[in-house]
Amino acid sequence: MNKTIKNLKNYPMEELNRIKASLKEKGVKIYDFGTGDPKEPTPDFIRKALIDAVPEVSQYPSVLGRKDLREAISKWFEKRFNVKLNPDTQIIPSAGSKEAIFHFPLVFIDPEEDKKRVIFGTPAYPVYERGTLYAGGIPTAVKLKKEDGFLLRLDKVEKSILEETKIVWINYPHNPTGATAPASYFKETIDMCREYGIILCSDECYTELYFEEKPHSALEFGIDNVVVFHSLSKRSGMTGYRSGFVAGDEKIISFYRKERANFGVASPDFIQQAAKAAWEDENHVLERNKIFKQKRDLFIEFLNKVGLEYLYPKATFYIWIKAPSWIDAKDYVKALLENGIVVSIGENFCSSLEVSEESCESQYFRVALVPTLEECKEALTLWERVHNSLQR
Protein backbone atom coordinates (compact mmCIF):
# COMPACT_ATOMS: atom_id res chain seq x y z
CA MET A 1 0.00 0.00 0.00
CA ASN A 2 1.12 3.57 -0.71
CA LYS A 3 2.98 4.60 2.48
CA THR A 4 1.85 8.21 2.29
CA ILE A 5 -1.80 7.17 2.12
CA LYS A 6 -1.36 4.51 4.80
CA ASN A 7 0.02 7.07 7.26
CA LEU A 8 -2.87 9.51 6.86
CA LYS A 9 -5.01 10.17 9.91
CA ASN A 10 -8.53 8.77 9.80
CA TYR A 11 -10.87 10.96 7.78
CA PRO A 12 -12.29 13.40 10.40
CA MET A 13 -15.97 12.80 9.71
CA GLU A 14 -15.52 9.04 10.00
CA GLU A 15 -13.90 9.54 13.40
CA LEU A 16 -16.87 11.64 14.48
CA ASN A 17 -19.21 8.86 13.35
CA ARG A 18 -17.30 6.45 15.60
CA ILE A 19 -17.63 8.81 18.58
CA LYS A 20 -21.35 9.27 17.96
CA ALA A 21 -21.90 5.53 17.75
CA SER A 22 -20.13 5.09 21.08
CA LEU A 23 -22.29 7.77 22.72
CA LYS A 24 -25.44 6.19 21.31
CA GLU A 25 -24.49 2.82 22.79
CA LYS A 26 -24.21 4.50 26.21
CA GLY A 27 -27.69 5.98 25.83
CA VAL A 28 -26.46 9.58 25.70
CA LYS A 29 -28.71 12.00 23.81
CA ILE A 30 -26.68 13.39 20.94
CA TYR A 31 -26.64 16.98 19.71
CA ASP A 32 -24.61 16.66 16.51
CA PHE A 33 -22.79 19.88 15.64
CA GLY A 34 -19.89 17.89 14.19
CA THR A 35 -20.78 17.00 10.60
CA GLY A 36 -22.14 19.60 8.16
CA ASP A 37 -25.30 17.66 7.35
CA PRO A 38 -28.37 19.83 8.12
CA LYS A 39 -31.62 18.35 9.42
CA GLU A 40 -33.89 20.77 7.59
CA PRO A 41 -35.99 18.73 5.12
CA THR A 42 -35.21 18.74 1.43
CA PRO A 43 -37.98 20.89 -0.12
CA ASP A 44 -41.05 18.98 -1.30
CA PHE A 45 -40.80 20.12 -4.92
CA ILE A 46 -37.25 18.73 -5.21
CA ARG A 47 -38.29 15.35 -3.81
CA LYS A 48 -41.29 15.27 -6.13
CA ALA A 49 -39.09 16.08 -9.14
CA LEU A 50 -36.88 13.13 -8.26
CA ILE A 51 -39.80 10.72 -7.73
CA ASP A 52 -41.46 11.75 -10.97
CA ALA A 53 -38.19 11.19 -12.84
CA VAL A 54 -37.47 7.64 -11.60
CA PRO A 55 -37.54 5.57 -14.80
CA GLU A 56 -38.82 2.08 -15.43
CA VAL A 57 -35.43 1.20 -16.89
CA SER A 58 -32.36 2.78 -15.29
CA GLN A 59 -29.38 3.50 -17.55
CA TYR A 60 -25.88 4.88 -17.10
CA PRO A 61 -25.55 8.67 -16.84
CA SER A 62 -22.97 10.32 -19.09
CA VAL A 63 -19.94 12.39 -18.10
CA LEU A 64 -21.49 15.48 -19.65
CA GLY A 65 -24.85 14.97 -17.93
CA ARG A 66 -28.25 16.22 -19.02
CA LYS A 67 -28.27 19.25 -21.29
CA ASP A 68 -31.30 20.77 -19.55
CA LEU A 69 -29.47 20.56 -16.20
CA ARG A 70 -26.41 22.31 -17.62
CA GLU A 71 -28.68 24.98 -19.10
CA ALA A 72 -30.41 25.47 -15.73
CA ILE A 73 -27.00 25.84 -14.05
CA SER A 74 -25.89 28.32 -16.69
CA LYS A 75 -29.02 30.45 -16.20
CA TRP A 76 -28.65 30.33 -12.43
CA PHE A 77 -24.98 31.31 -12.56
CA GLU A 78 -25.68 34.30 -14.80
CA LYS A 79 -28.56 35.46 -12.61
CA ARG A 80 -26.61 34.97 -9.38
CA PHE A 81 -23.12 36.16 -10.41
CA ASN A 82 -23.72 38.00 -13.71
CA VAL A 83 -21.34 35.60 -15.47
CA LYS A 84 -22.31 33.85 -18.71
CA LEU A 85 -21.19 30.22 -19.01
CA ASN A 86 -21.62 28.07 -22.09
CA PRO A 87 -23.63 25.04 -20.87
CA ASP A 88 -21.99 22.79 -23.47
CA THR A 89 -18.34 23.72 -22.95
CA GLN A 90 -17.92 25.34 -19.53
CA ILE A 91 -20.07 23.25 -17.16
CA ILE A 92 -19.82 19.62 -16.03
CA PRO A 93 -22.36 18.17 -13.55
CA SER A 94 -20.74 16.14 -10.79
CA ALA A 95 -21.82 13.73 -8.08
CA GLY A 96 -21.52 16.42 -5.42
CA SER A 97 -18.38 18.52 -5.11
CA LYS A 98 -16.23 16.14 -3.00
CA GLU A 99 -15.55 13.63 -5.77
CA ALA A 100 -14.83 16.37 -8.31
CA ILE A 101 -12.43 18.13 -5.92
CA PHE A 102 -10.69 14.85 -5.15
CA HIS A 103 -10.36 13.83 -8.79
CA PHE A 104 -9.19 17.18 -10.17
CA PRO A 105 -5.50 16.75 -9.25
CA LEU A 106 -5.52 13.24 -10.77
CA VAL A 107 -6.05 14.90 -14.13
CA PHE A 108 -3.78 17.93 -13.85
CA ILE A 109 -0.86 16.78 -11.67
CA ASP A 110 2.02 14.93 -13.32
CA PRO A 111 4.25 13.38 -10.62
CA GLU A 112 7.15 13.42 -13.09
CA GLU A 113 7.03 17.20 -13.57
CA ASP A 114 8.71 19.81 -11.38
CA LYS A 115 5.47 21.82 -11.27
CA LYS A 116 3.45 19.50 -9.08
CA ARG A 117 2.74 21.42 -5.87
CA VAL A 118 -0.82 22.03 -4.74
CA ILE A 119 -1.35 24.93 -2.34
CA PHE A 120 -4.29 25.11 0.05
CA GLY A 121 -5.00 26.93 3.29
CA THR A 122 -5.00 25.26 6.68
CA PRO A 123 -7.33 24.69 8.48
CA ALA A 124 -9.25 23.35 5.51
CA TYR A 125 -11.56 20.77 4.02
CA PRO A 126 -9.32 17.65 4.08
CA VAL A 127 -10.01 16.62 0.47
CA TYR A 128 -7.68 19.23 -1.08
CA GLU A 129 -4.69 17.58 0.54
CA ARG A 130 -5.86 13.99 0.15
CA GLY A 131 -6.68 14.35 -3.54
CA THR A 132 -3.19 15.78 -4.05
CA LEU A 133 -1.53 12.86 -2.28
CA TYR A 134 -3.44 10.28 -4.30
CA ALA A 135 -2.41 12.11 -7.49
CA GLY A 136 1.28 12.04 -6.54
CA GLY A 137 1.51 15.80 -6.08
CA ILE A 138 3.15 17.75 -3.28
CA PRO A 139 0.54 19.15 -0.86
CA THR A 140 1.60 22.54 0.45
CA ALA A 141 -0.41 23.82 3.40
CA VAL A 142 -0.35 27.57 4.08
CA LYS A 143 -1.45 28.57 7.57
CA LEU A 144 -4.51 30.81 7.54
CA LYS A 145 -4.16 33.52 10.16
CA LYS A 146 -6.76 35.45 12.10
CA GLU A 147 -4.96 38.73 11.37
CA ASP A 148 -5.40 38.05 7.63
CA GLY A 149 -9.09 37.27 8.05
CA PHE A 150 -8.26 33.59 7.42
CA LEU A 151 -7.54 34.44 3.77
CA LEU A 152 -4.98 32.39 1.84
CA ARG A 153 -2.38 35.05 1.00
CA LEU A 154 -0.28 34.00 -2.01
CA ASP A 155 1.72 37.22 -1.75
CA LYS A 156 3.20 35.80 1.46
CA VAL A 157 4.27 32.52 -0.18
CA GLU A 158 7.88 32.18 -1.35
CA LYS A 159 8.38 32.78 -5.07
CA SER A 160 10.24 29.47 -5.45
CA ILE A 161 7.19 27.61 -4.06
CA LEU A 162 4.81 29.42 -6.43
CA GLU A 163 7.02 28.51 -9.40
CA GLU A 164 6.58 24.82 -8.52
CA THR A 165 2.81 25.10 -8.02
CA LYS A 166 0.23 23.68 -10.43
CA ILE A 167 -2.99 24.22 -8.46
CA VAL A 168 -4.15 26.62 -5.73
CA TRP A 169 -7.32 25.84 -3.76
CA ILE A 170 -9.31 28.64 -2.17
CA ASN A 171 -12.63 28.23 -0.34
CA TYR A 172 -14.71 31.31 0.50
CA PRO A 173 -17.03 31.35 2.35
CA HIS A 174 -14.66 29.12 4.26
CA ASN A 175 -14.97 25.74 5.90
CA PRO A 176 -14.27 25.49 8.84
CA THR A 177 -13.92 29.14 9.94
CA GLY A 178 -16.84 30.73 8.07
CA ALA A 179 -14.56 33.53 6.79
CA THR A 180 -15.59 35.44 3.65
CA ALA A 181 -13.43 37.15 1.02
CA PRO A 182 -13.80 40.63 -0.53
CA ALA A 183 -13.73 41.30 -4.28
CA SER A 184 -10.17 42.67 -4.04
CA TYR A 185 -8.94 39.33 -2.70
CA PHE A 186 -10.26 37.39 -5.70
CA LYS A 187 -8.72 39.88 -8.13
CA GLU A 188 -5.31 39.74 -6.48
CA THR A 189 -5.32 35.95 -6.20
CA ILE A 190 -6.34 35.45 -9.84
CA ASP A 191 -3.61 37.84 -10.99
CA MET A 192 -0.94 35.99 -9.01
CA CYS A 193 -2.07 32.61 -10.29
CA ARG A 194 -1.90 33.84 -13.87
CA GLU A 195 1.54 35.31 -13.28
CA TYR A 196 2.87 31.91 -12.19
CA GLY A 197 0.81 29.72 -14.54
CA ILE A 198 -1.25 28.22 -11.72
CA ILE A 199 -4.79 26.85 -12.02
CA LEU A 200 -6.99 28.57 -9.46
CA CYS A 201 -9.61 26.20 -8.06
CA SER A 202 -12.32 27.92 -6.04
CA ASP A 203 -14.49 25.69 -3.84
CA GLU A 204 -17.72 27.69 -3.66
CA CYS A 205 -20.02 25.24 -1.93
CA TYR A 206 -21.08 27.81 0.68
CA THR A 207 -21.74 30.90 -1.46
CA GLU A 208 -25.50 30.42 -1.05
CA LEU A 209 -25.44 30.19 2.75
CA TYR A 210 -25.15 33.82 3.79
CA PHE A 211 -26.72 36.20 6.30
CA GLU A 212 -25.52 39.58 5.07
CA GLU A 213 -23.95 40.56 1.73
CA LYS A 214 -23.91 37.90 -0.99
CA PRO A 215 -20.56 36.11 -1.31
CA HIS A 216 -18.62 36.32 -4.58
CA SER A 217 -17.63 33.72 -7.14
CA ALA A 218 -14.07 33.77 -8.45
CA LEU A 219 -15.49 33.69 -11.99
CA GLU A 220 -16.83 37.22 -11.49
CA PHE A 221 -13.24 38.43 -11.72
CA GLY A 222 -11.93 36.29 -14.56
CA ILE A 223 -12.47 32.96 -16.29
CA ASP A 224 -9.08 32.19 -17.84
CA ASN A 225 -7.25 29.65 -15.66
CA VAL A 226 -10.08 29.63 -13.10
CA VAL A 227 -12.34 26.70 -12.16
CA VAL A 228 -15.12 26.73 -9.56
CA PHE A 229 -16.86 23.90 -7.73
CA HIS A 230 -20.48 24.19 -6.58
CA SER A 231 -22.90 21.88 -4.80
CA LEU A 232 -26.57 21.53 -3.91
CA SER A 233 -25.75 19.79 -0.64
CA LYS A 234 -25.97 22.82 1.61
CA ARG A 235 -27.81 25.23 -0.68
CA SER A 236 -30.84 22.99 -1.12
CA GLY A 237 -30.55 20.38 1.63
CA MET A 238 -29.45 17.67 -0.82
CA THR A 239 -26.39 16.20 0.89
CA GLY A 240 -27.53 12.65 0.21
CA TYR A 241 -28.37 13.32 -3.44
CA ARG A 242 -24.73 13.98 -4.39
CA SER A 243 -25.20 16.69 -6.98
CA GLY A 244 -22.98 19.60 -7.94
CA PHE A 245 -21.01 20.99 -10.85
CA VAL A 246 -17.60 22.17 -12.04
CA ALA A 247 -17.37 25.27 -14.26
CA GLY A 248 -14.94 27.79 -15.66
CA ASP A 249 -12.10 28.03 -18.17
CA GLU A 250 -13.25 26.26 -21.34
CA LYS A 251 -9.88 24.62 -22.07
CA ILE A 252 -9.55 23.24 -18.56
CA ILE A 253 -13.15 22.03 -18.46
CA SER A 254 -12.77 20.36 -21.87
CA PHE A 255 -9.66 18.46 -20.75
CA TYR A 256 -11.19 17.56 -17.40
CA ARG A 257 -14.38 16.30 -19.05
CA LYS A 258 -12.34 14.06 -21.40
CA GLU A 259 -10.41 12.46 -18.53
CA ARG A 260 -13.41 12.14 -16.18
CA ALA A 261 -14.70 9.36 -18.40
CA ASN A 262 -12.05 7.21 -16.71
CA PHE A 263 -13.40 7.61 -13.18
CA GLY A 264 -16.55 9.68 -12.90
CA VAL A 265 -19.92 10.49 -14.38
CA ALA A 266 -22.79 12.79 -13.51
CA SER A 267 -25.35 11.78 -10.88
CA PRO A 268 -28.11 9.33 -11.88
CA ASP A 269 -30.57 10.84 -14.35
CA PHE A 270 -33.44 11.15 -11.84
CA ILE A 271 -31.14 13.05 -9.43
CA GLN A 272 -30.10 15.36 -12.25
CA GLN A 273 -33.75 16.20 -12.85
CA ALA A 274 -34.21 16.96 -9.14
CA ALA A 275 -31.07 19.11 -9.33
CA LYS A 276 -32.50 21.03 -12.28
CA ALA A 277 -35.60 21.85 -10.22
CA ALA A 278 -33.39 23.01 -7.33
CA TRP A 279 -31.24 25.34 -9.46
CA GLU A 280 -34.36 26.87 -10.97
CA ASP A 281 -35.77 27.97 -7.62
CA GLU A 282 -34.38 30.58 -5.22
CA ASN A 283 -37.22 30.89 -2.72
CA HIS A 284 -36.32 27.74 -0.83
CA VAL A 285 -32.74 28.99 -0.44
CA LEU A 286 -33.93 32.21 1.17
CA GLU A 287 -36.19 30.27 3.53
CA ARG A 288 -33.40 27.93 4.57
CA ASN A 289 -31.06 30.85 5.21
CA LYS A 290 -33.63 32.41 7.53
CA ILE A 291 -33.54 29.26 9.65
CA PHE A 292 -29.74 29.12 9.71
CA LYS A 293 -29.62 32.80 10.67
CA GLN A 294 -31.90 32.10 13.64
CA LYS A 295 -29.52 29.38 14.77
CA ARG A 296 -26.47 31.57 14.20
CA ASP A 297 -27.97 34.44 16.20
CA LEU A 298 -28.90 32.06 19.01
CA PHE A 299 -25.30 30.82 19.21
CA ILE A 300 -23.80 34.30 19.07
CA GLU A 301 -25.96 35.36 22.00
CA PHE A 302 -24.82 32.28 23.93
CA LEU A 303 -21.11 32.65 23.09
CA ASN A 304 -21.16 36.30 24.13
CA LYS A 305 -22.92 35.36 27.35
CA VAL A 306 -20.36 32.74 28.42
CA GLY A 307 -17.41 34.72 27.06
CA LEU A 308 -16.13 32.40 24.35
CA GLU A 309 -14.12 33.97 21.53
CA TYR A 310 -15.28 33.23 17.96
CA LEU A 311 -15.10 34.42 14.36
CA TYR A 312 -18.31 36.26 13.51
CA PRO A 313 -19.94 34.22 10.69
CA LYS A 314 -21.35 36.29 7.83
CA ALA A 315 -21.87 33.10 5.81
CA THR A 316 -21.84 29.28 6.02
CA PHE A 317 -23.47 27.48 8.94
CA TYR A 318 -20.16 27.09 10.77
CA ILE A 319 -18.83 28.93 13.80
CA TRP A 320 -15.10 28.80 14.55
CA ILE A 321 -14.76 28.98 18.33
CA LYS A 322 -11.72 29.34 20.55
CA ALA A 323 -11.66 27.27 23.72
CA PRO A 324 -11.22 29.18 26.99
CA SER A 325 -7.62 30.07 27.89
CA TRP A 326 -7.94 28.21 31.20
CA ILE A 327 -8.41 24.77 29.61
CA ASP A 328 -6.90 22.77 26.78
CA ALA A 329 -9.25 22.61 23.77
CA LYS A 330 -9.12 18.81 23.73
CA ASP A 331 -10.29 18.69 27.34
CA TYR A 332 -13.02 21.23 26.67
CA VAL A 333 -14.27 19.36 23.60
CA LYS A 334 -14.05 16.05 25.48
CA ALA A 335 -16.32 17.43 28.22
CA LEU A 336 -18.85 18.53 25.61
CA LEU A 337 -18.68 15.14 23.89
CA GLU A 338 -19.22 13.26 27.13
CA ASN A 339 -22.47 15.18 27.51
CA GLY A 340 -23.60 14.46 23.95
CA ILE A 341 -22.60 17.79 22.39
CA VAL A 342 -20.60 16.76 19.32
CA VAL A 343 -18.25 19.37 17.82
CA SER A 344 -15.17 19.11 15.58
CA ILE A 345 -11.78 19.88 17.11
CA GLY A 346 -9.78 22.34 14.99
CA GLU A 347 -6.92 19.96 14.28
CA ASN A 348 -9.33 17.77 12.27
CA PHE A 349 -9.10 20.42 9.56
CA CYS A 350 -5.33 20.76 9.57
CA SER A 351 -2.89 19.19 7.17
CA SER A 352 -1.87 15.62 7.95
CA LEU A 353 1.70 16.81 7.41
CA GLU A 354 1.56 19.39 10.20
CA VAL A 355 3.04 18.50 13.55
CA SER A 356 3.19 21.66 15.65
CA GLU A 357 0.29 22.54 17.91
CA GLU A 358 0.44 26.16 16.76
CA SER A 359 -0.05 25.20 13.11
CA CYS A 360 -2.85 22.81 14.01
CA GLU A 361 -5.20 25.42 15.52
CA SER A 362 -5.04 23.49 18.77
CA GLN A 363 -7.28 25.88 20.71
CA TYR A 364 -10.13 26.05 18.18
CA PHE A 365 -13.13 23.88 17.39
CA ARG A 366 -15.93 24.06 14.82
CA VAL A 367 -19.67 24.06 15.38
CA ALA A 368 -21.92 23.14 12.43
CA LEU A 369 -25.45 24.52 12.89
CA VAL A 370 -27.17 21.36 11.71
CA PRO A 371 -29.53 20.35 14.55
CA THR A 372 -33.00 21.89 14.58
CA LEU A 373 -33.59 25.24 16.26
CA GLU A 374 -35.22 23.55 19.26
CA GLU A 375 -32.34 21.08 19.57
CA CYS A 376 -29.90 24.00 19.46
CA LYS A 377 -31.72 25.63 22.38
CA GLU A 378 -31.60 22.38 24.37
CA ALA A 379 -27.93 21.87 23.59
CA LEU A 380 -26.95 25.40 24.63
CA THR A 381 -28.68 24.99 28.00
CA LEU A 382 -26.64 21.83 28.55
CA TRP A 383 -23.47 23.45 27.16
CA GLU A 384 -23.74 26.31 29.66
CA ARG A 385 -23.92 23.82 32.53
CA VAL A 386 -20.84 21.97 31.23
CA HIS A 387 -18.96 25.24 30.70
CA ASN A 388 -19.72 26.47 34.22
CA SER A 389 -18.79 23.14 35.80
CA LEU A 390 -15.37 23.26 34.12
CA GLN A 391 -14.66 26.69 35.61
CA ARG A 392 -15.02 25.46 39.20
Image (tube, rainbow, N blue to C red):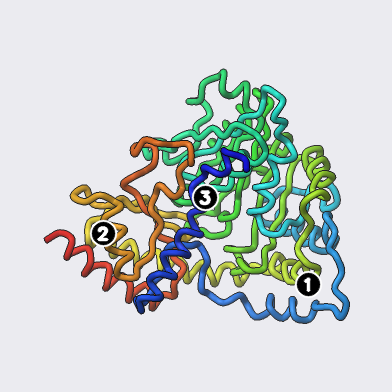
Q: Secondary structure at mark 1?
A: helix
Mark 1 = which residue? Answer: 270
Give the quarter of the figure containing the C terminus. bottom left
Callout 3: few (<14), some (14-19), or many (20+) C-alpha neighbours within 10 Å? many
Q: Which mark is residue 24?
A: none
Give whichever of 80, 336 is nearer the camera: 336
Residue type at numbered disc 1: Phe
Distance from the alpha carbon under mark 3 to that under mark 1: 30 Å
Eye-nearest disc, 3 or 1: 1
Mark 3 = which residue? Answer: 173
Vertical arrangement, residue 199 with respect to residue 30, above or below: above
Q: Tags 2 and 1 in contact by the CB under 8 Å rule?
A: no
Asked if residue 81 shows in the view, the reply is yes
Q: Tags 2 and 3 in contact by the CB under 8 Å rule?
A: no
Mark 2 = which residue? Answer: 304
Vertical arrangement, residue 140 with respect to residue 316, above or below: above
Work out which residue is located at the far front of the displayed protein and give it. Answer: 1
Residue type at numbered disc 2: Asn
Earlier residue among tags 2 and 1: 1
Callout 1: few (<14), some (14-19), or many (20+) C-alpha neighbours within 10 Å? some
Eye-nearest disc, 2 or 1: 1
Q: Secondary structure at mark 2?
A: helix
Give whichever of 3, 178 is nearer the camera: 3
Q: Give percent across and percent down for residue 21.
A: 44, 70
Instruction: Give the image quarter of residue 184.
Output: top right
Residue 377 appears left or right of 186: left
Work out which residue is located at the far top of the displayed protein and give it. Answer: 160
